[in-house]
Image (cartoon, grey):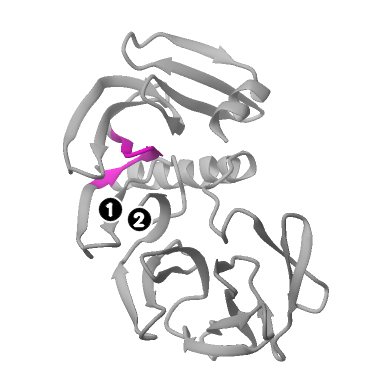
Amino acid sequence: MDNKKRIFRRLLVLLMTACFFAQTVFPVTAAAASYKAVSDSSGGIRVTKNGKTVTKIQVSGGYVSTQIAVSGQNIYFVVSSRTSRSNGNPYCYLYRKNISTGKVSRLKSLSGSYYGYDIETISGGSIYITGWNPSDNTACYRYYISSGKLSKVVSAGYGAQYKNYIVCESTKTHGSWVTYPIYVYNTKTGKKTCVTKSAAAYTLNGKYLYYATTGDYLNSGAITYTIRRYDVTTGKKSTIAKNIKAYHINKITPTYLYYADYKYPKTTYYRCTLKTKRVVTMSKSSYLSKTK
């Protein structure tokens, strides 16, 4: 591919990504379902369970993230220091607060090369944390609650989960025309598998990971995709559909592919039946209800 085409593609990606972020809901990453955390004006958070306030968390000199994890009476959270380093990255720390006693403990420094850290999930006695930079460089870390050990799982951020299987991706730009690797990590065995090095989009549906890889770039602005299915529990792959013409993919299901054509000032929304390749145009409200 010559330099002109590369530059054109990068410009398209920036435009598509801006539109996509405005309209797409990313996978939820936070605490157990009944717990919620909201920021307050002081830089702390208020934690609720089933709508009732459980506790308030405030750490002097730092901002408390609303992405928390809860195990028993312990709430785990990340604090970013108000004091930045010379390279602009804030100091970040993993903390724990016991709801019963009110005791707050600093567990681990997360002040590596990442701009910020998001707590994602608890699985198998460990907390999984994504370190991220504005440039989309990410990494997934595992914090062992019993030992306090912190280890890097993969140079890709947490994306989705099925039981003890965690899907990690190396970018937060879902569905864009920039391809990226996808990994599956088994929290029980510690085994890491690279499913593909060049996904354009993916959706985890139960134990099946549906993902798209790119083929030809068409003059209309569309791309031909191959849709594949990966069983995270067995590692078995199968091809679901080939030569599917689409634009910006937002979601893949066992039956349909949902994608959008972001052409300023109008965006057109589509649903493609994978088996027959039949395409129908959708209203914005219907499309968003299906892809959230």
Q: Position of residue 177 (x, y in %)?
A: 39, 40
* Magenta-tinted stretch: 197-213
The three-letter code of the residue at mark 1 reads: Val
Work out whether 34 lies above or below 103: above
> Can you tell which quarter of the image residue 227 is in?
top left
Q: CA distance from mark 2 to mark 1?
A: 6 Å
Query: Considering depth in this image, is 18 or 116 the residue closer to the camera?
Result: 116
Q: Position of residue 59 (x, y in %)?
A: 70, 87
Residue at the farthest right position: 41
The three-letter code of the residue at mark 2 reads: Cys
Q: Main secondary structure of the magenta part?
A: strand
N-terminal label among 2 and 1: 2
Residue 205 is inside the magenta segment:
yes
Residue drawn at point x = 62 percent, y = 81 percent: 98
- Residue 7: numbered disc: none
Q: Neighbour class for label 2 at 10 Å: few (<14), some, many (≥20)?
A: many
Residue 190 is inside the magenta segment:
no
Q: Position of residue 138 (x, y in %)?
A: 40, 65
Query: Which residue carries the number 1 mark?
Result: 184
Position of 109 with respect to 142 (left or right) is right
Residue drawn at point x = 53 percent, y = 57 percent: 29
Residue drawn at point x = 37 percent, y = 72 percent: 141
Q: Neighbour class for label 1 at 10 Å: few (<14), some, many (≥20)?
A: many
Q: Position of residue 277 (x, y in %)?
A: 35, 11
Query: Considering depth in this image, is 203 or 91 the residue closer to the camera?
Result: 203
- Residue 168: numbered disc: 2
Residue drawn at point x = 55 percent, y = 51 percent: 28
